[in-house]
Amino acid sequence: MNCGEGPRPDIRVGVIGTGFWGMNLCRNFAALGALAAVYDANPAVRGALPERFPGTRCHTSLGAVVGDATLDAVAIATPAATHEDIAMQALASGKHVFVEKPMCLDVDAAARLISEAERRNLRLMVGHLLLYHPAFEALHAAVRGGAVGELRYIYSNRLSLGRIRREENSLWSFAPHDVSMILQLVGAMPVSVVTNGEAYLSDGVADTTLSHLMFSAKLQAHIFVSWLHPFKDHRLVVVGGSGMAVFNDSANGAEKLLLYRHKAEWQGDVPVVSRADAEPIPYDYTEPLRLECQHFIAAIAQGTAPRSDGAEGQRVLRVLDACARSLRSGRAVAVT
């Protein structure tokens, strides 16, 4: 069905999957003048799309949207298990692809998607949203600029009550964001990982996991994720030799990103801790998803690799895959 005629932007994007997050993608691509088509597999949801997106083509099948010759790209916000198949269909139809995290559930599948995108000279971008958060960008710049000194350890909490899944565990649902940020900050892959967790609500679906990433003898990180937590805590802490930084995405304004110039050192045989007041790290806030969608459109228009391209998505998958194997085995696993 056609929901009416609207402006034809330079880059035309179709959104596949209009659930909670898909609606956010639709809203942002529409605001950027790029939303040209929508599709959802659920007939009840699909029936409401013409009213919600007047002036936008509303497709009634997946084949119709990936085969729509008027589209330059598709954005995929469907369950993770469907990502590989839909993304491959879109690439085979000559579409640039934005796919929500996790890119897919298999490292080899990621390699196939990357190869297909490269073969067709198409952009493949993964929705690692927090890489585009202005506060994280400011944190990354501060760490690279030496604000905390030599990195010692990083930890990340992504905790809340709710958004419980049955098709994927908390590791695959929550941790991609944290893995992508940590890899960006460190600039290297971990050597090995150890993950522990437990399933309380559905057999085989871990509600909470704790992953320990070992980069070197002097640099480690851990990621704690759970949807069975009494309050929301989305916090990334970076500890270095001359300072500490905290990106608290549950806070607002200047409290969201703080630098502490704390120091701990030995004076003779006595450990001495020097405390300092928190210093806000300035950043200019724009909605991260708006920036991410802009980045995708710009990558297509300019023919450049997105920051969270297929290769970055595959690196995150390699870490997640190792964590998943460790969770099953109860042992440390090398990242391959």
Image: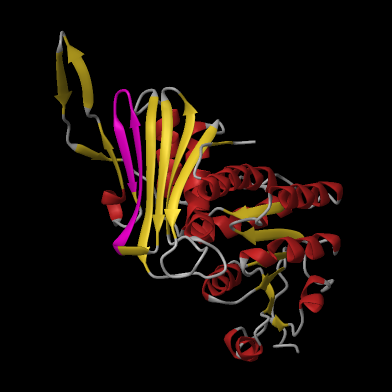
Tell me which residue sits at (61%, 53%) in the image: 295
Tell me which residue sits at (66%, 45%) in the image: 314
Residue 32: name its quadrant.
bottom right
**Which color scheme does this rendered protein use?**
secondary structure
**Residue 235 is one of the magenta-drawn residues:** yes
- The answer to whether residue 107 is above or below residue 193 is below
Q: From the image, which quarter does the C terminus lie in? A: top right
**Closer to the camera, 322 or 126?**
322
- Specify whether 278 is left or right of 38: left
The magenta span reads: 230-247
**Residue 274 is one of the magenta-drawn residues:** no
- The answer to whether residue 65 is above or below residue 130 is below
Q: Position of residue 98 (x, y in %)?
A: 67, 59
**Closer to the camera, 229 or 99?**
229
Q: Position of residue 123 (x, y in %)?
A: 74, 52
State the predominant SS element of the stretch in magenta.
strand
Q: From the image, which quarter does the N terminus lie in? A: bottom right
**Closer to the camera, 217 or 52?**
217
Residue 272: name its quadrant.
top left
Q: Which residue is the extreme one toward the top? A: 268
Tell me which residue sits at (30%, 33%) in the image: 244
Q: Position of residue 322 (x, y in %)?
A: 58, 43
- Specify whether 109 is left or right of 135: right
Q: Position of residue 77 (x, y in %)?
A: 62, 68
- Specify whether 309 is left or right of 285: right
